[in-house]
């Protein structure tokens, strides 16, 4: 009993657990309900590209779907700020989550070919509106010093969900990819929709949301969008904001490439059986959880630049190892997953908190939306480019990623470390 009490006290004193226990209001709801989204998503995600491939989509088709999705994400990102201000954080989050997740998961469950995925991608792009409004719900009433810990817990909720991935792997081995994915998409529809209702009925509009609702009452959506021109110009004149957006662009490009083409590369080029795909997210999760609870708080003592450069070096090293010929395919895939996991655990929370910290709270929704516009406008061609490269050689998209990591490192190297460090611990 005494040992259990002592263990509980030690856990409670850990910065991450202290943050989790003391969350209140909208931040608590956003973090606590995230597993209802994470569990089905991480059951599905290892097999999405394979599912598309099994339904007859070529590598170029898969890249085209990614490019179309990002193009529409650019459009919806542009209107996300005005919509969030006009209709409120809470209502916008609910309606756009249903449109961008509930409906597409049903569509993908019954998909028959390329155009089904294009249609689902267009609807999914509405998620850029709910991502904006949801992040406002998450951060506008939160303790700003706890933002990295909050974003870390969101990452953790997804990582814990990954431990169910062997279930989908076992089902794929027994029943094959297509029928299993159809059932998993239906389960995703149920769990995600349940989450959206819980968040809507138990959350409350934020104080800043109420202010923006009052300020935009009687103002047309067209006029609100037109007002964004001045915000864009102000953002582009701010060197710090431009650097942050560049970081998001580069991170998004590598995520699109690795997310779509890692499963195809390891199964098609390295000869790893389809059923093993579900186990790579588990390796990733174990490594990341160990890092998050064992070393993340130690790195937070360092300034922003050093951890980011370490993470990017790990990303590049992992990718080089993955595409190095002459080594055992399974070893290459496992080592890549280990290094990539460390890299993601270092880079992702700092990237997310950086944007949240550098936004004017009064104009958070519009700035977030416009930041996403710039991010997806710059990223959109790379889904198609990666698909075209993969159609030549499935190692080539990862060569593209190596170039992205080098550019990413150059941007981080020019960040004013003395000013940014205190904001992203």
Image (spheres, rainbow, N blue to C red):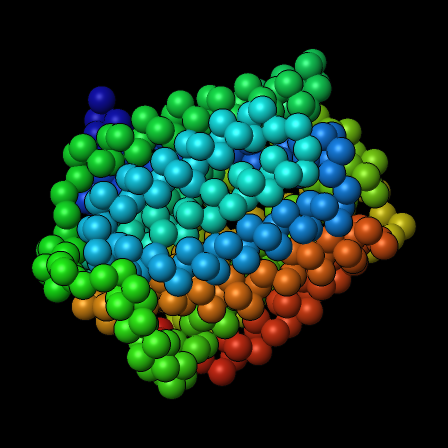
Where, quadrant-wise, is the N terminus in this rendering? top left
Q: Compare residues 190 and 221 and report the one nearer the observer.
A: 221
Residue 225 found in image quarter: bottom left
Number of numbered markers: 0
The residue depicted at 36 percent of the width and 52 percent of the height is 129
Which residue lies most toward the top here?
A: 174
Q: Is residue 173 visible?
A: yes
The residue depicted at 35 percent of the width and 43 percent of the height is 96
x%, y% of residue 371?
Answer: 40, 67
Which residue lies most toward the right here?
A: 326
Q: Determine whether 20 is above or below 235 in the image.
A: above
Where, quadrant-wise, is the C terminus in this rendering? bottom left
Q: Determine whether 48 is above or below 253 in the image.
A: above
Residue 158 found in image quarter: top left
x%, y% of residue 259?
Answer: 62, 47
Q: Determine whether 229 is above or below 293 in the image.
A: below
x%, y% of residue 212?
Answer: 15, 61
Residue 399 found in image quarter: bottom right
The residue depicted at 34 percent of the width and 48 percent of the height is 130
Q: Compare residues 276 and 49 and report the one nearer the observer.
A: 49
Q: Is residue 258 visible?
A: no
Question: On the picture, is 128 further left or further right than 422?
Answer: right
Question: On the picture, is 232 further left or further right than 207?
Answer: right
Question: On the picture, is 360 further left or further right than 76?
Answer: left
The residue depicted at 61 percent of the width and 74 percent of the height is 407
């Amino acid at each position: 009993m005494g040992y259990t009490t002592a263990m509980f006290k030690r856990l409670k004193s850990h910065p991450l657990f202290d943050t989790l226990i003391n969350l209140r209001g909208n931040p608590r709801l956003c973090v606590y309900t995230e597993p209802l989204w994470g569990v089905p998503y991480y059951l599905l995600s290892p097999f999405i590209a394979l599912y598309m491939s099994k339904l007859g989509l070529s590598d170029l088709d898969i890249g085209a779907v990614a490019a179309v999705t990002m193009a529409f994400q650019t459009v919806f990102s542009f209107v996300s700020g005005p919509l969030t201000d006009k209709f409120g954080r809470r209502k916008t989050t609910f309606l756009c989550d249903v449109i961008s997740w509930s409906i597409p998961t049903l569509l993908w469950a019954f998909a028959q070919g390329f155009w089904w995925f294009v249609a689902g991608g267009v609807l999914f792009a509405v998620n850029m509106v709910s991502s904006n409004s949801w992040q406002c719900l998450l951060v506008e009433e939160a303790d700003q010093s706890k933002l990295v810990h909050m974003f870390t817990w969101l990452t953790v909720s997804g990582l814990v969900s990954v431990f169910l991935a062997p279930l989908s792997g076992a089902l794929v081995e027994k029943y094959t990819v297509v029928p299993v994915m159809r059932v998993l998409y239906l389960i995703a529809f149920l769990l995600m929709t349940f989450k959206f209702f819980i968040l809507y009925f138990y959350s409350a509009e934020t104080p800043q949301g109420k202010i923006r609702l009052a300020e935009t009452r009687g103002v047309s959506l067209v006029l609100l969008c037109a007002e964004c021109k001045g915000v864009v110009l102000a953002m582009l004149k701010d060197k710090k904001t431009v650097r942050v957006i560049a970081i998001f662009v580069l991170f998004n490009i590598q995520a699109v490439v690795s997310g779509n083409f890692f499963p195809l590369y390891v199964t098609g080029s390295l000869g790893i059986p389809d059923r093993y795909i579900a186990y790579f997210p588990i390796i990733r999760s174990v490594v990341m959880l160990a890092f998050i609870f064992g070393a993340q708080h130690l790195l937070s003592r360092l300034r922003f630049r050093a951890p980011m450069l370490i993470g990017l070096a790990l990303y590049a090293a992992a990718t080089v190892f993955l595409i190095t010929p002459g080594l055992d395919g399974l070893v290459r895939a496992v080592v890549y997953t280990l290094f990539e996991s460390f890299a993601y655990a270092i880079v992702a929370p700092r990237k997310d908190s950086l944007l949240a910290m550098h936004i004017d709270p009064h104009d958070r929704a519009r700035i977030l939306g416009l930041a996403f516009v710039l991010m997806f406008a710059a990223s959109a061609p790379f889904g198609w480019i990666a698909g075209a490269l993969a159609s030549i050689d499935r190692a080539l998209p990862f060569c593209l990623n190596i170039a992205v990591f080098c550019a990413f490192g150059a941007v981080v190297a020019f960040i004013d470390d003395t000013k940014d460090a205190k904001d992203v611990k």
